[in-house]
Image: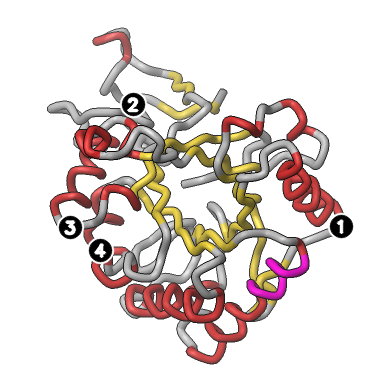
Amino acid sequence: MKRSLPHIACFTLLVATCIHAFSQPASKPLTVTAYYAGNASSIDNYDVGKLTHIIYSFCHLKGNRLNVDNAADSATIRKLVSMKKKNPSLKVLLSLGGWGGCAPCSDVFADAGNRKVFAESVLNLCNYFKTDGIDLDWEYPTIQGHPGHKFQPADKENFTALAKQLRETLGDKLEVTFAAGGFTKYLVEAVDWQEVMKHVDRVYLMTYDLINGYDSVTGHHTALYSTAQQVFSTDNAVQYLVSIGIPRDKLVVGAAFYARVWENVPSVNNGLYQPGKFKNSV
């Protein structure tokens, strides 16, 4: 559940922490990506030399086309692209959606003609802004995401068809990625992993918000490992995908740069795994 927060949320490639890393050449670069939702000037506060990718968050659908919402957003995208002067290997992607930002996606992407027009609009925007691809942040296909947003069983097949259309339209030089929920229902039901991963460069696992504002029991919202009380974790998500044959070098795990505050929590086990009421984030 990626929100449009005014900060950078960074991701590091799985191979940095798993056994696969030991079989890779030392010179192989890691993927270090930031989803950026700030304004044009705030990016100067960060060392973009430490990043391989910045994903502008977020663009939305206008009809069946990818749309940059306003002039301020356009200025931010141009500013991000200008960071390539500081880091020539940096890639800048446009992201569609975000939590609450993909309400019409189920209906729009159910139609092959719409998917084709959308892919062409992505290519046009990438050419216009000199960006390097598209990240799909549809939350969520097939299963319930943002309250009130349509979802349907056909989303699974349509999501794969969308990724395939994007790859055919954008070619191999522009990247196609997507953000995926790190919880079990998404992992098992939302997308056809075996098919969709044929067409994308990588998947950004949202291994955060695993305990969120809709829950009534506290826990680690971006847990690294599972416990007896909490199954959802980064390790749980990664091990599942590895077990079904998803290439490790296409998996990127997410790190949240925020925490959650709860109230009315019993003074038991330091408040962990206790009933409570979500208050806010920090």
Residue annotated with mark 3 = 245
Disc 3 crowd, CA 10 A, few/some/many (<14, 14-19, 20+): few
Q: Earlier in the sequence, mark 1 or mark 2?
A: 1
SS of the residue under disc 4: helix
In front of the other: label 1 or label 4? 1
The residue lying toward the viewer, choosing from 25 and 153, is 25
Label ID, residue 168? none
In the image, is residue 62 above or below residue 129? below
Labelled pair 3, 1 in contact (Cβ < 8 Å): no
Height in image: 16 above or below 264? below
Q: Residue at x 61, y 34 (%)?
A: 8
In the image: residue 101, left or right of residue 227: right
Tally of numbered tags: 4
Residue 243, above or below 87 = below
Residue on which the image places disc 4: 189
Q: Nearer the viewer, residue 28 or 64?
A: 28
Circle 3 SS class: loop
Check residue 278 for magenta coloring.
no
Label 3 sits on what residue type?
Gly
Would you say the residues marked 2 and 4 are in contact, meaning their CB atoms lie under 8 Å apart?
no
Distance from Cα at disc 2 to Cα at disc 4 = 23 Å
* Residue 115 visible in the current orientation: yes
225 up-or-down from 172: above or below? above
Residue 213 position, x and y percent, is: 45, 37
Query: Residue extending furthest right?
Result: 71
